[in-house]
Amino acid sequence: MIGEEYFLRLKRITYENFRNHRSLTFEPSDDITLIYGENGSGKTSILEGVLYCALTRGFVGATDSECLSFLSDYFLLDSNFLGESDNAVNVKITYKKEKEKQVIVNNSEIKPFSRHIGRIPCVTFSPQELVIVNGSPSERRRFLDNAMSQTDRRYLDNLLDFRRVLQQRNALLAQWQDRNKVQQEMLSLWTEQLSRVSSSIVSARVRFLASFFNHFSKLYSQFSLDEQPAITYRSSLGKITEKTSTEDLYNRFLGRFNETRQQEIMRSQTMTGPHRDDLLFLINEKEIKKYASQGQLRTFLICLKLSLHQFFYDTLGEKPLCLLDDIFSELDESRCADIVSILQNCGQTIITSAEKKFQGKLTVISIGSLKK
């Protein structure tokens, strides 16, 4: 890729019965497009439709049925992208009531949906995603998993395998009978499999964070010169570093499961594993979810997302699509200008805002003009 620069581009997307858009066509510029309009006018829905085509799902917590227009029984998204060397990718998402949605890429149906993840790398920002920095550990694990799954197919496969094995092991614990030898043998089997896949997941997460933090710390310094951020992986196994081998993690998982066996049987659930881990976000050695202001929380999240863009580019050799919902809200003009300056080098970016913004090179579109 040296000497050439590739970036993913959305050329066109049409919406039918999606959210509050009965029929709408959107064609963004190849650089930064800003869609402005009043709250509730459908700006976020435009981004969500693009996100569906990239990752087969919408923003945090949205279900397929919630994306149906009022009184409609189906929605359709039809999008055209250009990738590396201008290769065309057509993605159609259809959903009908009481039926599973369909994902069709270049006229071929994709099943399972996970096969599509990574084809159209995408970085998002949404005010709802503040829960990543100030919410429960599950939100931070979701952030990790979503980021890594788009750049590492092996990680995604391991994650899907982990969820399957965890479900089977928990089901066995829930119907446990002490004298049942078959169950005892099955528990040993599921524990071994869970330990193996858990060690691969945790090892990959720690290595990802070490690489990702290099991008994050550099970007954060552009927003704040007097704050030192840190990101720590908090494992149910205790301290883990890049030097901790996968085999060591595997043995530690086996040991921990042996220690907590009776507790797990009593609780009917697996108490150790990647599904119990967390990320610790710090500023000047203080946990931000406890001590940071709203402005610091928002800035931290913005830096997380923009750093992901650079990480994706370095890893994939292609700039991902940026979908940024209401990113300028609650930020002063100087901070907004800093963000636009960074985005100038990020390839195609689509931003929503309640107000017009003319800082830097922007293509500005009124949501009202798209609905005509």
Image (spheres, helix red, strand yellow):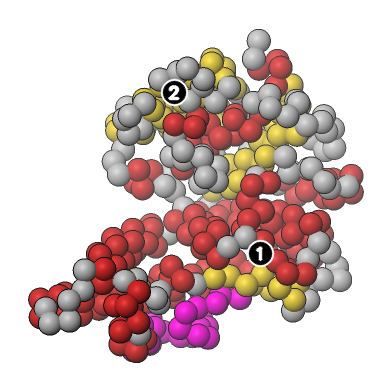
As displayed, is residue 318 above or below residue 145?
above
Query: For this view, does 171 lie left or right of residue 117?
Result: left
Please give the name of the residue rendered at 46% of the width and 38% of the height, measured from the top-left corner.
63
The reply to whether the magenta stretch includes residue 239 is yes
Residue at coordinates 47% horizontally, 59% vertically from top-left? Answer: 145
Residue under the point 70% across and 15% down: 369
- Crowding at dot 2, Cα within 10 Å, few <14 / some 14-19 / many 20+, comes out as many
Report the side of 42 relative to 50 (left or right).
Answer: right
Q: Secondary structure under badge 1?
A: helix
Above or below 115: residue 172: below
Q: Is residue 39 above or below residue 309?
A: above
Give residue 339's position: percent from left, percent from top. Answer: 78, 48
Check disc 2 and report the residue beneath it: 75
Q: Is residue 253 above or below residue 326?
A: below
Q: Amino acid at mark 1?
A: His
Q: Position of residue 202 (x, y in %)?
A: 44, 73
Circle 1 residue:
215
Residue 274 badge? none
Given this view, does label 2 or label 1 mark the residue nearer the observer? 2
Q: Quadrant of the C terminus?
A: top right
Query: Does 360 appear in magenta?
Result: no
Of mark 2 and mark 1, the one earlier in the sequence is: 2
Location of residue 308 in the rendering, given as x and y in whole percent from the top left corner: 60, 56
Label 2 – label 1 distance at C-alpha: 38 Å
